Amino acid sequence: MLKIGDKVKFLNAKGGGTVTGFVSKKVVNVEDEEGFEVPCLIAELVKDERFVNETSSPIPTRNVSGKPVIEPAEVRKPKKESQPLFASSAGKPAVPNGAYFLAFVPEVPTMPLSGEIKAWLVNDSDKTLLYHFSLLTNGSYASEKSGRLGPYSCVPLKGITHSDFSTFPSFGVQILPFESNGRELQNALVKTLKVNPVKFYKETSFTGNAYFSTRAYLIDLLENELSKEIEKLKQHDFSAPKVMEESGDLKKPVIPKQESPDLKEVDLHIQELLDDNQNLEPKDILEIQMDRFRFEMESAIQNGTKRIVFIHGVGQGTLKNELRRELSNRYKKYDFQDASFRDYGYGATMVILRRK
């Protein structure tokens, strides 16, 4: 086990340094030989054997009588549950008319997935909130946290790590705003949010904001529901090849001719393709994902799309390997490569269909 003050060496790089603090259970800050402090995975560090026998225990001081003086233990102040917002503390919301956000703040801003990503509830309004935060798993809402949140403040809800992505739940948020001396009663907010874990792989998801000193991924809980439904209708695939084929209306999917976009993005995560996939076997899930991959490839080729990005995630690599095997055999005349690491991390493949 490492502790503050330990001398360590890097396993995957030259040099070493001194442990100066703990970022999470898996990440520590190390001050290197040049005086720079960097976050490092504990698994990639090893104690420097040259300093193993040194003790970090201070030599006790002695008083006039010669008896050792025992220093009082440091008393840590209790951590406040909610925190004021520096940008809104003057009584003016950062967003016109106020807003409520579900915020995701990475513990290590430079490496979001190496540490914990904490979910926060942000109250950027002059109202006091009674809130309830829950997780939707297997069709039931499990209560995670509830309480009272003052105006222009935020409260941590839950920590999320990379290992949680394989069984990532939906989030249930209930909010009842009120004023101590209000003229009218406020409407309650009840919302279930489905957050795609792919968002946490994209550096562009985390932006500067008025609420945290680091970049964060913010979801507006007061976003107009009507506009979201209209957007869903715009994006709806009315060809619905599977449904039309089953009904007998169409034997083969008809790919509509449309304008040629330069880049098309297709998310192959099963939760993006089906509303309910709990009863599917892994092989059935893979078949559905590959069917969608083939349909999108044929559509992109016919429509003259220049490049198409398939988001397959990291996981165990099954979908990625199957996708690339089919590209090498069925679509071998097209080049493919890892998509932008900045935008997708290691979880996407870009196929180049047409050169500029």
Image (spheres, rainbow, N blue to C red):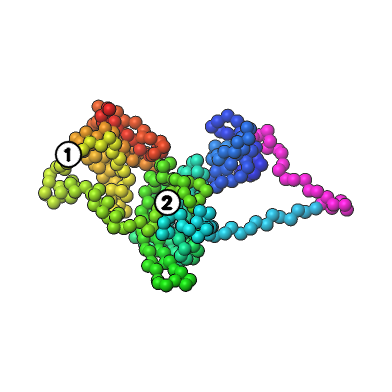
Q: Nearer the viewer, residue 172 or 306?
A: 306
- The part of the chain drawn in magenta is 47-68
Measured in 3D between alpha carbons, the distance from the residue under mark 2 to the one under mark 1, in whole angstroms, is: 36 Å
User: Is residue 63 within the magenta segment?
Assistant: yes
Residue, far right = 65
Label 2, secondary structure: give it: strand
Which residue is at 44% across, 68% downward?
A: 178
Quick check: 138 above or below 241? Answer: below
**Residue with the mark numbered 1:** 257
Q: Is residue 93 visible?
A: yes
- Residue 349: % across, % down: 33, 35
Which residue is at 33% across, 40% downward?
A: 311
Residue type for callout 1: Lys
| Residue 14 - label | none
- Residue 6: % across, % down: 65, 40
Q: Quadrant of the N terminus?
A: top right
Residue type for callout 2: Leu
**Residue with the mark numbered 2:** 218
Q: Which class describes the residues within 10 Å of circle 1: few (<14), some (14-19), or many (20+)? A: few
Quick check: 208 above or below 184? Answer: above
Quick check: 194 above or below 354? Answer: below
Which residue is at 25% across, 42% downward?
A: 292
Q: Quadrant of the C terminus?
A: top left
